[in-house]
Amino acid sequence: MTSTHVIAVGPFAADVATSLARREGVDASPSFFAQGTNVDTSLLRPADAYVLVTSRHDPHVLVRIGDIVRSWGAALVPVVHETRRLRCGPILRPGGTGACAACFEARSVQNWSIGESFQGLYDFYRRDAAGPEGHLSSHTLLAAGLAQWGLDAVRAGKAVHGAYRTVSLVKPQVTEGTTTGVHGCARCYPRADAGARRDASWRELSEHLARAGAPAEEDS
Ligand SMILES: [Zn+2]
């Protein structure tokens, strides 16, 4: 059974972590961190997979913990309490192709028309360490269920890097999909691949233009 360690940031996340700690294959002692404090990764227990639960939208902590967990060769299942929905993902698997947390954010702003209107709220979150408190116990269970979905996929060895699932908190709506990384991202396209990708997309065009502009063989 894959060992899983849960990292909880903030009060909502702490309740989700407590719920998850009772589940099979999950370390019974989660790591708890207060909202707005630095997640000290030296305190985390070794595991094959980590669930990172945040009590509000905080892409910076997802990116940072994602980088560290990736360097350990482990998988990361983020669970985020956004303003109006609960989200699991983007799942990170070592060596997987898909989107990192930074690319997921960039794609969200790109594709989600109300994404930008939340920017003021996210800026406020960054300035205010404590933030709003209180949440429903049903949301805790929903978030634990989302984490379980991500963990099951990772444990089954599925290619879920970049995959996400969300549950709306204001209307009956579930969304899911897999986000691809933004071209040029060093996390999603490591240096060894980046050259090949750039070459592949531009070489074909330049060869095509050269052929189109060059006189035909029989004319020369
Ligand atoms: Zn990326």
Image (cartoon, rainbow, N blue to C red):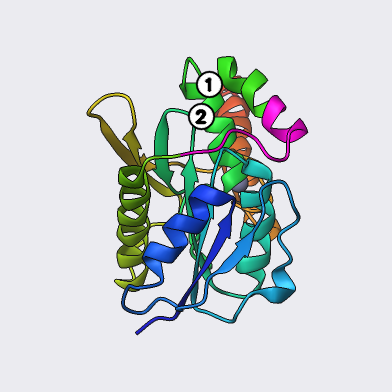
Quarter the C terminus occupies: top right
Dot 2 falls on a residue whose secondary structure is helix
Seen as rendered, the residue at the extreme front is: 134
Dot 1 falls on a residue whose secondary structure is loop
How far across and down, in percent of the image, does residue 82 sit?
49, 35
- Quick check: is 126 in the magenta stretch? yes
The amino acid type found where label 1 is placed reads Gly
Determine contact: label 1, label 2, CB under 8 Å: yes
- Under 8 Å from ligand 1: the CB of mark 1? no
Quarter the N terminus occupies: bottom left
How far across and down, in percent of the image, does residue 126 sit?
73, 34
Labels 1 and 2: the sequence-earlier one: 2
Residue at the disc numbered 1: 115
Distance from label 1 to label 2 (Cα)?
7 Å
Q: Nearer the viewer, residue 101 or 117?
A: 117
Residue 205 appears in the rendering: yes
The amino acid type found where label 2 is placed reads Ser
Q: Which residues are magenta?
A: 123-134
- Quick check: is 12 in the magenta stretch? no
Q: Is residue 101 left or right of residue 85?
A: right
Q: Which mark is residue 108?
A: 2
In the image, residue 75 sits, relative to residue 48, either above or below, namely above
Q: Nearer the viewer, residue 163 or 82?
A: 82
Pointer 2: residues within 10 angstroms few (<14), some, or many (20+)?
some
